[in-house]
Image (cartoon, rainbow, N blue to C red):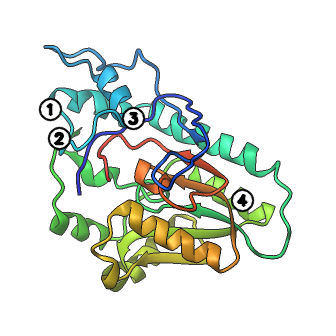
């Protein structure tokens, strides 16, 4: 896994995908005020420009947040802007969803990623009162997951409740281990307000070799093969939204701590 800071920056509508690796149409991005505190840093690196480049997927394969931008990311996460950005994405998703005419046959689906789309891992990255440029450590991260203490991402439980009221079948697809993390994931999700779902899909051991785009594409393909219509698809990473069967419309949440491919 390669990690890179990815805060959400602005609205982007892309052309219709003509191949599995092209961007789905459209991806919606929203982001913070360019005047956010911590924007200017010493030296040549401008953290806001850097954030824009990585959010556009122009800069890739970084391992950690640049050290110069620790404070900048901290201001974004701990201030008002991150919750505001998440809520705006959720509001736009709901405006789209409530305008749809569902069939009522139980096959109208909305897909959510789990990590940093529904459950926030921000506390894991918050070290010594700041967000550190820290490399991914699988053992440490699984220890955090097994605590079952992740809070909800701002605005998403409210969107989830509204989608249920509209009649959508909610399907969660996560790269978390089926063998290790099924029970604690269900506990954590229910504890923060995600009380029911059509499917909660976790990664099987046999799927460990698949990269994230391949894995998510495979699972969405199985959902479509079961007769579901994917009206909405929401994630915090580009790899949640790329690949086969991305859905009728996709929505990307901010993720200012890492990049997954």
Q: Are there few (<14), some (14-19), or many (20+) residues within 10 Å of tag 4?
A: some
- Seen from the viewer's position, the closer of residues 88 and 58 is 58
Task: Using the image as rendered, state which of residue 83 and residue 178 is in the foreground.
Answer: 178
Q: Is residue 229 left or right of residue 25?
A: right
**Could you tell me if residue 11 is visible in this image?**
yes
Foreground mark, 2 or 3, reads: 3
The picture places residue 172, in percent across and down from the top left corner, at 53, 69
Question: Between marks 1 and 3, how big is the CA–CA gap?
Answer: 18 Å
| Residue 67 numbered tag | 1
Look at the picture and state if 87 lies above or below 224: above
**Inter-mark Cα distance, 4 to 1:** 39 Å
Please say if the residues under marks 2 and 1 sit with CB atoms less than 8 Å apart.
yes
User: What residue is drawn where x is 79% and y is 66%?
Assistant: 167
Earlier-in-chain disc, 2 versus 1: 1
- Kindly identify which residue carries mark 4: 163
- Left or right of 166 in this view: 160: left
């Amino acid at each position: 896994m390669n990690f890179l800071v990815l805060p959400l920056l602005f609205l982007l509508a892309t052309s219709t995908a003509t191949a599995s690796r092209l961007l789905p149409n459209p991806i919606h991005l929203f982001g913070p005020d360019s005047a956010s505190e911590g924007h200017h840093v010493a030296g040549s690196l401008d953290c806001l420009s850097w954030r824009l480049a990585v959010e556009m997927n122009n800069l890739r394969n970084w391992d950690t947040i640049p050290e110069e931008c620790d404070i900048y990311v901290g201001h974004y996460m701990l201030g008002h802007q991150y919750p505001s950005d998440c809520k705006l994405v959720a509001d736009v998703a709901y405006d789209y969803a409530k305008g749809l005419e569902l069939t009522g046959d139980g096959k109208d689906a909305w897909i959510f990623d789990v990590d940093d789309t529904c459950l926030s891992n921000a506390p894991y990255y918050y070290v010594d009162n700041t967000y550190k440029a820290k490399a991914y450590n699988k053992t440490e991260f699984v220890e955090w997951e097994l605590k079952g203490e992740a809070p909800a991402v701002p605005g998403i439980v409210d969107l989830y409740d509204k989608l249920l009221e509209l009649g959508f079948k909610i399907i969660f697809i996560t790269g978390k281990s089926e063998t290790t993390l099924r029970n604690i994931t269900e506990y954590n999700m229910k504890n923060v307000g995600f009380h029911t779902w059509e499917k909660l899909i976790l990664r099987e051991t046999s799927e460990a070799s698949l990269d994230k785009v391949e894995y998510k594409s495979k699972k969405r393909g199985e959902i479509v093969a079961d007769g579901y219509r994917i009206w909405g698809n929401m994630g915090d990473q580009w790899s949640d939204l790329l690949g086969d069967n991305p859905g009728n419309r996709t929505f990307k949440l901010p993720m200012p701590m890492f990049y997954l491919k």
